[in-house]
Image (cartoon, rainbow, N blue to C red):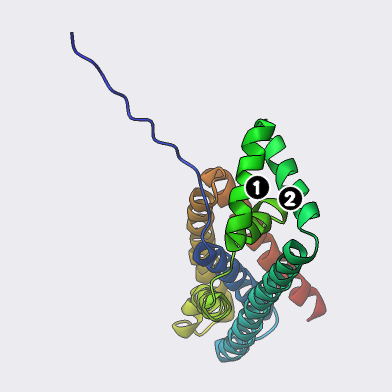
């Protein structure tokens, strides 16, 4: 009699900080310069002006987005440090209250009181583990990577630049803005569709739905900018 063993593989998505930063930078990088180039294509007669304005926007956008990512990560780290100091102070000043909070956490998992008291006594001997448990289960905070702020800023900025170069690329080779816009629209919408699909795979949502939504949003932004520029000019 043969036994068949079936391995159970759990598939859970946990978006890494790197992936999140790439998504943030790339999505805006593809959309904003595309909309700017489309708008200028409807009002100027020189691709040089579009390239100049587009390059300036990419530079400014990359700096702004990168700085935003840096500040967000720094704020997260500072918040963690503040809460960490507070938890250390509480287990030193009001340990009874903290013990009750630990008990409440494990009662949610229907542990017996004897088991809970055993856990509490073990944690009291290892205060660093006690504080770590409270940070994770009471506050839902994970210790941030010390290099997170720097890495986030660099990743978001580079992703923005990479995304922004896609819609501007045709204008390097075409003299007429409208001709450049047509090619730019095709390659950018394709890039948006691919990016949206990949983003959906990494974020655990429907890849095709994500691809459709990303493409529509980018196309609408560019179309609105183009029509507005036409009306103004």
Q: Regarding mark 1 in the picture, which secondary structure is present there?
A: helix
Residue closest to the eye, 222 or 140: 140
Q: Quadrant of residue 58?
A: bottom right
Callout 1: 10 Å neighbours few (<14), some, many (20+)?
some
Q: Where residue 120 is drawn, which disc sits there? A: 1
Question: Is residue 51 among the parts visible in the rendering?
Answer: yes
Which residue is the site of mark 2? 99
Marked residue nearer the N-terminal end (1 or 2): 2
55 vs 2, left or right, is right
Where residue 87 appears, as percent x and y from the top left, is 72, 64
- Residue at 74 percent of width and 66 percent of height: 92
Q: Where 18 falls versus 98 (above or below)? A: below
Residue 200, image x, y percentages: 53, 50
Residue 164 visible somewhere in the drawing? no
Residue lying furthest top in this view? Answer: 1
In the picture, which quadrant includes the C terminus? bottom right
| Label at residue 77 | none
Q: Is residue 83 left or right of residue 128?
A: right
Looking at the picture, tell me which residue is in the foreground, 230 or 112: 112
On screen, residue 193 above or below 157: above
From the image, which quarter does the N terminus lie in?
A: top left
State if disc 2 and disc 1 touch (CB < 8 Å).
yes
Coordinates of residue 121 in the picture (x, y in percent): 63, 48
Q: Quadrant of residue 226?
A: bottom right
In the foreground, 215 or 183: 215
The x and y percentages for residue 188 are 52, 66
Disc 2 secondary structure class: helix
Residue drawn 73% across the image and 68% down it: 83
């Amino acid at each position: 009699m043969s036994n068949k063993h079936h391995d159970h593989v759990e598939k859970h998505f946990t978006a890494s900080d790197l992936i999140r930063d790439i998504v943030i930078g790339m999505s805006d990088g593809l959309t904003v310069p595309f909309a700017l180039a489309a708008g200028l294509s409807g009002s100027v007669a020189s691709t040089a002006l579009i390239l100049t304005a587009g390059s300036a926007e990419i530079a400014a956008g990359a700096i702004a987005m990168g700085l935003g990512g840096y500040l967000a990560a720094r704020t997260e780290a500072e918040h963690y440090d503040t809460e960490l100091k507070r938890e250390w102070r509480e287990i030193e000043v009001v340990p009874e209250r903290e013990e009750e909070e630990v008990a409440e956490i494990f009662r949610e998992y229907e542990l017996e009181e004897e088991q809970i008291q055993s856990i509490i006594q073990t944690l009291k001997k290892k205060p660093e583990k006690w504080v770590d448990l409270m940070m994770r289960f009471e506050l839902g905070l994970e210790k941030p990577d010390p290099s997170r702020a720097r890495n986030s800023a660099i990743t978001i900025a580079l992703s923005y630049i990479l995304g922004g170069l896609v819609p501007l690329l045709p204008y390097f080779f075409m003299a007429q803005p409208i001709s450049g816009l047509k090619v730019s629209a095709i390659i950018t919408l394709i890039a948006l569709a691919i990016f949206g699909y990949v983003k959906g795979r990494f974020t655990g949502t429907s890849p095709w739905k994500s691809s459709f939504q990303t493409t529509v949003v980018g196309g609408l932004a560019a179309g609105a900018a183009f029509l507005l520029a036409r009306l103004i000019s």
